[in-house]
Image (cartoon, helix red, strand yellow):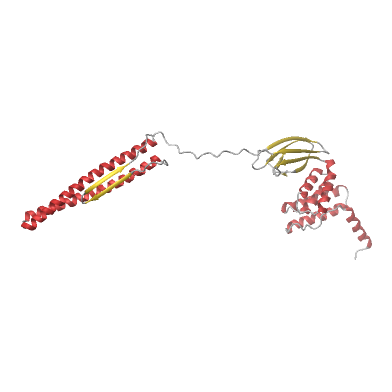
Amino acid sequence: MLSFASLLLASLLSLAVPSMAAADATTDNAEARVYFEEGNRLYQEAAAASGTRKTALLQRSLEAYVDSLQIARSRNALFNAAVVLGDLERYDESFNYLSEYLRLDELSAQDRAEAEQRRDALRAKVAVLALRTEPAGARVWIDRKDLAPRGVTPLEVALPPGEHRAFLEKDGYEPVERTQTIVRGQAVIVELALVPLPLEPALPPAEPLATPESKPRLRNAAIGTAAGTLATAGVALGLSLRARTLREDADQAAEQYRMSGDAADRQRAEDLADRTDRFNLAADVLWGTTIALGVSAIVLYGVHRGKQKREAPEVAVSVSRQGAFASVKMAFGGAQ
């Protein structure tokens, strides 16, 4: 059992230690809790020490709290680190840790009041730059933009006395840069109205650039193909008409053979039938070529005209027992 003297010493030590957060219930991270409890243990030992040993124990306690914060940013570790920094007379850092602690939403009224009291007690020992913007929420860098932002507005930050440059940025607003001199024991309040960025006018979609001769070439190609279509259709029409005439002659020769039974009439009828088949085959090939050329002319013409609303070219081909007919109707605009 503990002696009465031991119990009395433990009680006196607990009274000598400033208010510190106990076991950190704000994080479920076991490793962070180990560092946090180590910081508490070292702080208790520092309370019973003096001189350089006390300073060394406070430093080790701070390192343990910082290690815990690097794993999980818990409110109890923030508060205890601020207390230790104050004991080490690192007042700027203590003030800033308390400011971060006070920005937490889950604080009770009692915890908030205690933290505000501690921070107010530090104001006489630090130089404070208070930044406020309308609208709020601007990110703040102090002196160096290559580091992480110090926070967002509204923001109070303790800094070494002297001149400092603040950089503020918020999406949709023009960035702001402000140079301000601060002195120890005072808080310099800087209020800024952020200027919205001008709305950029919507630009019409860019028209594809054409080479100086691209449009005339397409137009000329369409015209040339259409002309070729007409020429091929004319030849095909001629062959079809000739095949028709030969068919009539072959029919007459066949009738003559049936009446006479003469071998010469039979041979003439067969020759005429063969010639009719050859002309029909040639005509079919040319009609197919005519259709292909007509389609090509339409495509070229459509590319040339682009999205302009003009009458589309038409290619018509008809073949019947009475004859064959081919036409191309194209509406050409002025030269472009």
- x, y percentage for residue 240? 21, 48
Q: Quadrant of residue 254?
A: bottom left
- x, y percentage for residue 179? 73, 34
136 or 63: which is nearer to us? 136
**Residue at image location 79% in from the left, 48% down from the top:** 98
129 or 226: which is nearer to us? 226
Relative to 44, residue 203 above or below:
above
Of all residues, the one furthest to the bottom in this rendering is 1
Q: Tell me if 64 is positioned left or right of 273 in this view.
A: right
91 or 212: which is nearer to us? 212
For the image, the number of numbered tags is 0
Image quarter where the C terminus lies is top left
Of all residues, the one furthest to the right in this rendering is 4
Q: Tell me if 265 is positioned left or right of 52 in this view.
A: left
Image quarter where the N terminus lies is bottom right
Look at the image and tell me whether residue 120 can be seen. yes
Relative to 9, residue 134 above or below:
above
Look at the image and tell me whether residue 57 can be seen. no
- x, y percentage for residue 133? 72, 41
333 or 98: which is nearer to us? 333
- x, y percentage for residue 154? 74, 43
Q: Quadrant of residue 156?
A: top right
**Residue at image location 39% in from the left, 36% down from the top:** 215
**Residue at image location 75% in from the left, 35% down from the top:** 180
